[in-house]
Amino acid sequence: MTNRRYPGVSPFTRDQGNIFFGRDNDIDKLHKLISLRKQVLLYSKSGIGKSSLLNAGVIAKLTDKFIAIQIRFFSFDENNFQTPVRSIILSFREAIGDFEDLEDTIIDKYAPPEYIDNSLWCQFKKYQLNHPPKGKEKGKDFILIFDQFEELFSYPQEQVTEFKDQLYALTRVDVPDSFMEMIQGKKGVEENPQYDALFDSLNIKSVYAVRSDRLNFLNHLTDRITDIQKVYYELNPLDEKQAGMAIINPAGQEGEQFETPPFEYEKEAVDRILNALTDEEKKTIETTQLQIVCQTIEDIAASKKPDSSGKIVITVADLPDFKDIFLRFYEDSVKKTDQPDEARIFIENHLIRNNQRISLDENICLDFVSQETLSILVNTHLLRAEQNNVGGKSYELSHDTLLEPIIEVKKERIAREEREAEKKRREEELKHIKEQQAKKLRRNRNIFITVTAIGIGLTIGCYIWKDSQVKAKKLEIQEIQLENQALEKKRAEQAAFIARQ
């Protein structure tokens, strides 16, 4: 399987320590703190690299002395019936690998199976009883590493309560009261060879990685884990020296496991990248932004031919337009939501004002997009959520490098909408003109038909009238002829009468 030299927006994994650079000082400090203290709180802003620091840096240094159990709760899903406690149990069993093969212990003798199956203390203690130290050799202790621990607080309150109660029993007491009640007064329990071992400390350490804007959520646990915020380590953004190492060193690593051959950077090219990514106010660089850019450059290196010395060297001329990189990142992030059009308008119209990124209270944001969309945009590192001074959260674009491409996209969107509106206006106007023409044509046709009908009617009327006049004249002539014939007949009869006289 081949790997990328730069993971992009995804955190570094445990097997990517060979390409994880720039955090040596943080790795050493955090490792020492974990070694000295029972629990440590690791916090930073989103996108700074907490998960990568743990996965690719710290855990590798812990595994010599500890069995590291990495735990992710993920956000609550009502269709997923896996509780936080169950997630820890499954992660624990995956880490040790042979839980089903463990021999029965004093726990199995006195506790019912459903109790054992759902108890953190029973799970860990059963493993310890199966792996007692031999002579001077001490067995490995456990370390629970809770990555993105803030996800715990998305679960129903009863599951959060169960988590803190069981974690307290696992890390703060020798034997839970509930189990002591099960064995209390049982015959022969104290003679059991494993009885004393029940009270041996499990020596479990804990590391909680939390986003800084969610630190206040930890207050929900302090009734049980009172000192959860006492020992802490803040992870800061990369400075320019650290960022330079994170850019240059992965490119030069040898190995067939990489998708691309080794390549180098021209100094001017590195400077150009650093200048583009630097927060001018704080002179720091966010890990996610750097990885997005470097992954694109890795694609460019893959298609570039070696120079005369046989090396592949990235020069200033090879660098992509940073606007295009972040524009693609912006578009990809928005498309991951269920309401991409609403998300675009929300970001372009409300999170950018006067060509500057602004921060909006969560309640205002929810007028434009859903909580799920906000969560997705934060998880892709397009947006950042911060605690505000009124006890809530505010959202803003994660970096100034996103401003220019998003502003240009907005201009293009507005221009496109104006063109579409103008096209629609012209289509409506043309439609109106055609309707008026059709209406006029219908009116003219009706007039023509009416006039024609009148003309035909008059013609027919004239014909009928003339015909009637001719017929009347003929009748009149016939009547005169008849009258003349009658008169002639009468005269003839009178002449005949006179002649007879």
Image (cartoon, rainbow, N blue to C red):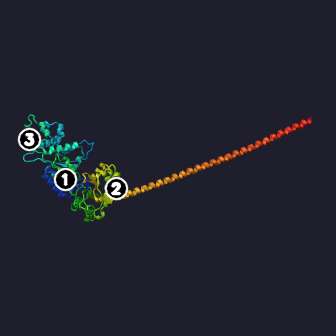
Outermost residue on the top side: it is: 187
Q: Is residue 201 left or right of residue 405?
A: left
Question: Where does residue 178 sit, x and y in percent of width and height?
Answer: 14, 39
**Residue under label 1:** 42
Residue 189: name its quadrant.
top left
Q: Which comes before the other along the chain, label 1 or label 2?
A: 1
What's the amino acid at mark 3?
Asp
- For the residue pair 188 and 441, the one nearer the viewer reads as 441
Residue 349 marker:
2
* In the image, residue 146 above or below residue 353: above
Q: Is residue 80 left or right of residue 35?
A: right
Question: Where does residue 179 sit, x and y in percent of width and height?
Answer: 13, 39
Residue 196 marker:
3
CA gap, disc 1 and disc 3 = 36 Å
Q: Which comes before the other along the chain, label 2 or label 3?
A: 3
Is any atom of residue 353 visible in this view?
A: yes
Question: Where does residue 417 sit, x and y in percent of width and height?
Answer: 40, 55
